[in-house]
Image (cartoon, helix red, strand yellow):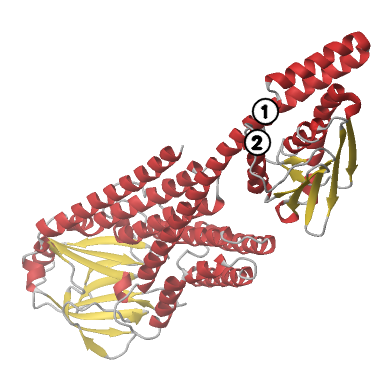
Amino acid sequence: MKKIIEGKIWTAVCVALTLLMIVSAIWIGMRYYVSMDIYQTPSMFLEGEYSVDGGEWKSIEKDRYITDHFHKIVFKGKMSKKLLMYFGSLTISSKNVWYTLKTSDGTVIQSYNFDDEKLSYEHTQTDKPLALDMPNTPGYCVKTIYPDYLTKTENITEDSDLIFEVEYPYSYALVSYNDCVDVTAYYNEGMYLRFFYDALPPVLLFVLICFFGLFFFPVASFILGKIDYKYLTFGMLSFLWGLYMIMQQISGYLNLWIVDPTVCMMMDKITGYCFVAAVLFYFKANMSSRGTRIAANIASAAYLSCVFTVFILHLCHIRDLNASSMTMNFATAGSIVIMIVLLCVEMRINRNALFFLLSWVPLLLTVAIDAVDQFIHLPGSHYFNYGLAITMIVQIVRLIGDLRLQYKEAIRHQQMQKELYEAKVSVMTSQIRPHFMYNALTSIAMMCEIDPKIAKEATITFAKYLRGNMDSLKQTGPVPFTQELEHLKKYLYIEKLRFDDLLNIEYDIQATDFVLPLLSVQPLVENAVKHGVGMKEDGGTVRISTRETETAYEVVIEDDGVGFDINEQKDDGRSHVGMENTKKRLHDMCGGEVKIESVVGKGTTVIVILPKEGQPNEDTLS
């Protein structure tokens, strides 16, 4: 079994690493062999100046991305000769903005505006597939300008003054121009080429992450023999992380395949909201106390209610998803803060909660940096994605380490179960060995002539005793003491039938609400009968008693037989494996121990101590 589990885990890891290497090789090969001259991605296709929200005019710097936050930004300048003469097409990919390209005299060359009757359907002959028909929502749009058409039909030359106006129609917040408008200049079908070159390799990588999350952690949990909610939620989190990152890579291309721009925007937003929901459920899975888990369920349900509400408002054309972004940002932040507070409360009883919180520091730090970036322009952008990647890698490493520990624990448990099974077989065979059965059957045969009624009762008792021994092979855990006592009484009934007046049995049972391994007391009683009072000419008494102390339950087996010297190494030709197995089973299953006191000529006392810490609660016993 150990080799099977280990083989499956290593197979999954090797397959994942192999696919990762293949994707990396494809990406590196494309980077090496594909020429960047096939297409270009200029920050702005005009050479001139721009103004943000009616402010001062700034020069457009070549090869420098425009990160200004705006509600309306206007560009004035000339289209470069290279774009007009050498590139066949110019594609503008926009997100949540309207824009218009016109000449200095106001002639519109290209527009994407709510007043545009054709909107984004002018390049297709279909009847608005997947259209939600929301004319006041820009969504995600991809449009193409053909320079050859401009030069021949519109008489646009490299000396013509052009104006490019971009308007963000939402009033609740400013956005960066670079995040709203992307330009691609190419010779032929460059948007698809750019997708294949820039977006496809990371998309394949994140597809691999999706499959990794969807199969590796849940399957690993199943292989270990149990369904662990923590691994299932993290598997879903990894899947949605990969899906979220895929959407980040392809969101600018969605309008190439999905005609309605609002549907493109909806897909991007919903993917992000689902990812946040998965984060909340994963947080809850790492909580152990009932109170914090209930509070986490309420917070998660409240967040999902917000998602459902804004989605319905979007479908009903009341308020689109982008207009509800600020509301959802507050809902997300509030839910995460609640989860962090609950985990802080959890630290009192679960020390792993602290390490779990620390593993999310990179993401929380980059979220804070992005929040500050809304007010001051920091170098670079999208810190959130880097923090998210670091955090998810930390989570994967942490859970793989946890899986490794559970794997070792599962192997140890299997080994212990094997040893316990062998011990139970040993106990059973030692108690139904041929001479014991011969003596029992001989005693019953003699009683058939003396008292048939007692002989019948003895036969039934002996049959139940044998059946109890056989049933012990199916028992994998501790049993209530009352069950062990009933089986013990059957054994002593048979021995009493054999020894008659030479064997006296006394019981003093003061405590029964505890558990112990099946057939763990009987070998001790058997020793008292056979090697204690059985070796004494005039017989004796075996006394079985139980008692409860402040910290443990105790089972005491006393006899007034011949006794022995516990310090003497006995070499009597008998195997003492049964006694050692009994001690091991008591220790492994209940944390118990066995103490033996004996005086030669006076008898032996055996005390089985079962700590209360290893016992189930009273509700379980009842």
Q: Residue at x 20, y 79 (%)?
A: 64
Q: Measured along the vertical axis of the image, is residue 530 above or below residue 54?
A: above
Q: Residue at x 48, y 48 (%)?
A: 407
Residue 566 position in % (x across, y down):
70, 47
Would you say residue 595 is visible in this rendering? Answer: yes
* 218 and 137: which is toward the camera: 218
Q: Measured along the vertical axis of the image, is residue 434 above or below residue 164?
A: above
Q: Which mark is drawn over residue 378?
A: none
Residue 197 position in % (x across, y down):
19, 57
Query: Gap between marks 2 and 1, in whole Å?
Result: 8 Å
User: Is the C-beta separation of discs 2 and 1 under 8 Å?
Assistant: yes
Would you say residue 606 is visible in this rendering? Answer: no
* 428 and 15: which is toward the camera: 428
Dot 2 amino acid type: Gly
Dot 1 amino acid type: Ser
Residue 418 position in % (x across, y down):
56, 37
Figure quadrant of residue 340:
bottom right
Residue position marked by numbered label 2 in the rendering? 578
Q: Measured along the vertical axis of the image, is residue 513 above or below residue 184?
A: above
Residue position marked by numbered label 1 in the rendering? 430
Residue 432 position in % (x across, y down):
70, 23
Q: Secondary structure at mark 1?
A: helix
Q: Residue at x 83, y 16 (%)?
A: 443
* 225 and 432: which is toward the camera: 432
Image-based side of 42 in relation to 441, left or right? left
Dot 1 crowding, Cα within 10 Å, few <14, some 14–19, many 20+: few
